[in-house]
Image: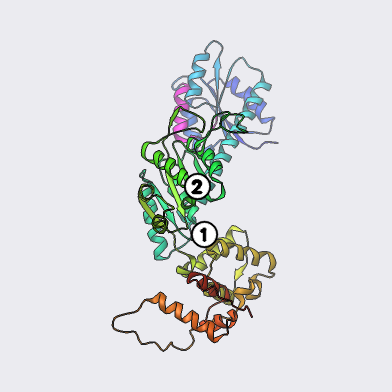
Amino acid sequence: MPNEKLLIVDDEKNMRTVLRRALSAEGYEVFEAATGKEALDVLTDVMPDLIVMDQKMPEMDGLTALKKVKRLLPSLPVVILTAHGNVQSAVEAVRAGATEYLTKPFDLDELKLVVSKALGVRDLFREVDTLRAELKREYDLATIVGQSDQMRDIYDVVKKVATTNATVMVYGESGTGKELVARAVHEYSRRSKKPFIQVSCAALPETLLESELFGYEKGAFTGANTAKKGRFELADGGTLFLDEIGDISPAIQVKLLRVLQEKTFEHLGGTKTIKVDVRIVGATNRDLQEAIADGTFREDLYYRLNVVPITVPPLRDRKEDIPLLVAHFLEKLGSKRKMSKEAMARLVAYGWPGNIRELENTIERAVILGSGDVILPEHLPAELRAEPVPGGPPVPIELPSEGIVLENLEKDLLEQALRRAGSNQTKAAKLLGISRHELLYRMEKFGLHGPAKRS
């Protein structure tokens, strides 16, 4: 049985009585008001789920009362009752925000059906509003978790650039959260109610990527049995996120440059010029300056894309954010478990070559495989269970007055550790006070791919 509250507004007492009895019998809690003014006076006290209101009343007619109700409670459904032959007024009421209208005389079963339908529409709108709010929260800056200086700088840039139409390029290693930044730019912009369309450029071969971006006409190629809109058209008015844009072919780069310059393109196999209003947000884990130097990326396209660059730091460079991220992922998983100090120390000491994505997977694994209220070091993957070396002895290096190149020193220390450990990666990592996983990351960073033993 329903338990919603209904407010009946009608200047005829007999009509109110009939409606109250019919709707009360359906399980609704029914309140009454004799005028539009009286309805407004009791509205915030009663807080009904739906109003059934006569269109023609003294002092304040139903249409005027409806407009005032909608200003106070925009999502509140209102069913308007109108006299036969006055349908035009009912149409005006619907335009003013009424959910439904009934023409007198009406059947009580019809009234019950209309009320039930209007409440169903209300529930649907509430669900949509909830989903929108959840989506906005999911990609809100508040969920790009971190309070480090690097992340605070990113928040400031996102808020500033979002209010413009400037093209944005998001740089960062795989797993750092580039898509979240792109979505935050969209959600904070005036385009937030329009589509956010994503394309993973690296996942599609050139011919398929071209048809996905620009669409095609029927018969443009074998298998094109119907015309299809491309992602640019689908994103019209909104944002197009081109993930891993550094991997697109020279031919696609030329077409993309034209869209950025002229806001126009043609379907594959078509001749009609299509104009779109789309904001581009690109992302890549490549160094585009190097790609320009080796001839794989157009310099003119780079400058069109790189209007506002945002670099998302790797997790190893913002380790102070790890406890916040751990708490976020535990909450996201719906887990009440806590991270022990020892386990948190392992998480903070680790190098995280897979960045935030690897951390999230690690927390999920610990929640699934662990037991008890507290996550312990033994619940973590093997590469995180190694004891972190607390400082170790000071490195006997005297800083020369002319300075040093820190990366050269790091590479030299890696090579020394590997030589001293006889290429045993586990022993070399222990000598350097890092995990084997982090050692592998740093070896790859400096191109140290010589034969190395695991143990």
Question: Which mark identifies residue 93?
Answer: none
Outermost residue on the left side: it is 401
Answer few, some or many: residues within 10 Å of disc 2's Cα (few below 14, many 20 plus, some between 14 and 19): some
Q: Which residue is identified by label 1?
A: 174
- Which of discs 2 and 1 lies nearer the camera? The answer is 1
Q: Is residue 72 magenta?
A: yes
Which quadrant is the N terminus positioned in? top right
- Magenta stretch bounds: 61-77
Please indicate, yes or no, whether residue 56 appears anywhere in the rendered image: no
**Residue at 42%, 61% in the rendered image:** 151
On residue 136, which mark appears?
2
Which image quarter: residue 150? bottom left
Image point 44% across, 36% down: which residue?
A: 237
Picture quarter with the C terminus: bottom right
Q: Residue at x 66, y 30 (%)?
A: 24
Please provide percent x and percent y for residue 190: 40, 41
| Residue 142, x across and y down, in percent | 47, 55
Q: Which of the pair 38/185 is nearer the observer?
A: 185
Report the amino acid beneath label 1: Ser
Rendered position, 34 above or below 441: above
Q: Which residue: 56% across, 39% down? A: 128
**What is the spatial separation of the Cα atoms under label 2 and label 1, in whole angstroms?**
23 Å
